[in-house]
Every structure is written in structure tokens, then in C-alpha cells.
Image (cartoon, grey):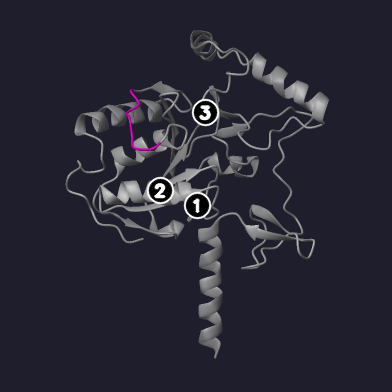
Amino acid sequence: METIKRNDYNFAFLDEGSKREIRRAILHAIAIPGYQVPFGSRELPIGRGWGTGGIQLTMSLIGPNDTLKVIDQGNDDSVNAVSIKRLICSTTGVETTTDTAEANIIQSRHRIPEEPLREDQVLVLQVPTPEPLRSVDAHEAVTRQLHADAEYTGIWVNLFEQLLTRGSAFKGADHPVMADDRYVMNPSPIPRYDNPKLDHAQCLYLFGAGREKKIYAVPPYTKVESLAFDDHPFEQENMEGRKCRLCGAEHVYFDEIFDPETGERYYQCSDTGYCLKRQNEQKAEKEGLR
């Protein structure tokens, strides 16, 4: 992605005072895994609800020598991903990539990349609703007190009701997790297929909610456990028997594509960067055999 750095803005758009305040909130969040740290969310030239929390985290952390990757539901080329990349790159001049391994800062909406992340990488997740207790009580003062008391009965009741009415206690996305045996948190609207990637991961996970003005984190090597009942253990989406039509990958999270002309259903890697990398490797291998 070609970008020209604009010199009429501060580096990474935000003023230095705002960056310092957000970094302090990040450090607070890292010190207490899963705890929601309030911060003064800034105005950005992008509508709230389109990832302003994640953008502010990325802008506060990024430096001239960093490499950025932005994905939206696994896609590197969606409108949301391209717009965020354009904003950040035009005010920093940093390089971008679609290869997860090449990036040290990855901003994502609704997905965690398929490739395991390293200790030198940071994954920033955009969060629309950071409060897992919002369905229990709409008042912020009440939910903060419930977190302080570690009183999560309401969440367990909601999961039990879902089990009775739908036959499964597991949400398709945004399934709540327990961080470090203390705080229940929303992992952002990632599919529950990605929930296990949070547990004892090598990378730092940062969660930013611009509209709700909250930051929270999962530091490296932190225990993260998806909520489940003893007699109904946690289950990921079943991807057995599926294969990507483009790269042949198995045992990854797939998008299901319906072709109205043929009436057939196809499966394709949700992580487009991972899929493209596999295709390029397969192409290079074929050319090397010629």
C-alpha cells in the first residue's frame, strides 16, 4: 500500500499528551489482566463504532520503524481495514504488510490471525462493547461493583438460559472469558474458534473501545479460560472435513461462500493474508520443481 506521509499532522495524528495518557492506561491494563481501564477517548476523522478505540491504541504505540497489518474479519482489503491503514500510514509513513509474520503491530476487527503470534508482536482488537455484564445491568456503577466483588452469577445465568433455549451455552462470537482467574471479559466479537488463542499466548493482546472509553489487556503467557459448565465443556466451531478452495488449508476458520449460479457451497480461509501466503508458497514450490 503506497502512502505519502503528511507533515501537517503530528506523527500518528494524536498529540503527544494524548498518547502518553493512553500509554499509561495501557500499562494499567497490562498490570491487571481483563480489568477495564477508563480513558479519555479522542475524536478521530472516522465514525465511532468503526474502530476508534483500536486506532487510538495503535497510534499511541506505533513508531517510524514499525510494520503494520490491519484486518477486518480476517480480510486485509475490506473498506474498514483499508481506511484505517490509510489514516495511520498517511500520518506516520510506516510500512504495511498482509503477512502476519512481518508485522509487529496488528490491528484487527473480529478475528485473530491464524499464524501464532510472537513475543515481539502486539495484537490490537477493536471492541464495540467491552462490558460482559452489560446484559446483566445497564448501569456502569453497578457493573463496576460486580467486577470488584467478582460477582458473575448473572453471566452464568445468561449462559444457562441460552443452554436451555438454544441447546448450547456458547455464543457464536464474543463468548466471555475469565482472565487470570479473576476478571470476566469480552474477547471482542471474535468467533469462539479464536478464544483458545488468548490462553498463554506469546504476544500482547490489547482491547480498545473508543465509544465506551475503555482499554483492557491480556499480557503474554496469561491464563485465559472460556466460560463453560463442567458438564458442557467449551467447544469451538467444528471445521472438520472442510478445505479452503484457494490454498487447500484445513483446520482453520473458514468463510462459507454460496454460489447462486451453481447452488454449491465453498469454503475459504477467513484470514486472507494467511491464505495468500500459502498460495504464494505453493506457487513458488511448483516453479522450483520445474
1 or 3: mark nearer the eye: 1
- In the image, residue 43 lies in the stretch drawn in magenta: yes
Amino acid, disc 1:
Ser
Q: Give the range drawn in magenta.
A: 40-46
Mark 2 or mark 1: whose residue is earlier in sequence: 1
Q: Can residue 169 be seen in this view?
A: yes
Q: Earlier in the sequence, mark 1 or mark 3?
A: 1
Write down the residue under mark 3. Answer: 180
Q: Residue 83 carries which label?
A: 2
Q: Please name the residue shown 71% across and 45% down the image.
A: 237
Name the N-terminal-most of marks 3 and 2.
2
Residue at image coords 70%, 63%? 243
Q: In which quarter of the image is the C terminus?
A: bottom right
Relative to 172, is 281 on the left or the right? Answer: left
Mark 3 residue element: loop
Q: Position of residue 49 (x, y in %)?
A: 47, 33
- SS for callout 2: helix
Up the image or down, 133 lies above or below 50; here it is above
In space, the residues marked 1 and 3 are separated at their CA atoms by 34 Å
In x, y percent, where is residue 200? 52, 40
Separation of residues labelled 2 and 1 (CA atoms): 8 Å
Q: Where residue 235 sits: x, y (%)?
A: 72, 40
Residue 66, image x, y percentages: 30, 52
Q: In this view, does 45 lie above or below 271?
A: above
Other-residue count near label 1 (Cα within 10 Å), few / some / many at <14 / 14–19 / ≥20? few
Tell me the CA gap for discs 3 and 2.
35 Å
Considering depth in this image, is 69 or 121 the residue closer to the camera? Answer: 69
Magenta-drawn stretch, dominant element (helix, strand or loop): loop
Q: Disc 1 designates what residue?
A: 78
Inspect the image, locate mark 3, and give the three-letter code of the amino acid beneath it: Asp
The residue type indicated by label 2 comes to Ser
Which of the pair 247/128 is nearer the observer?
128
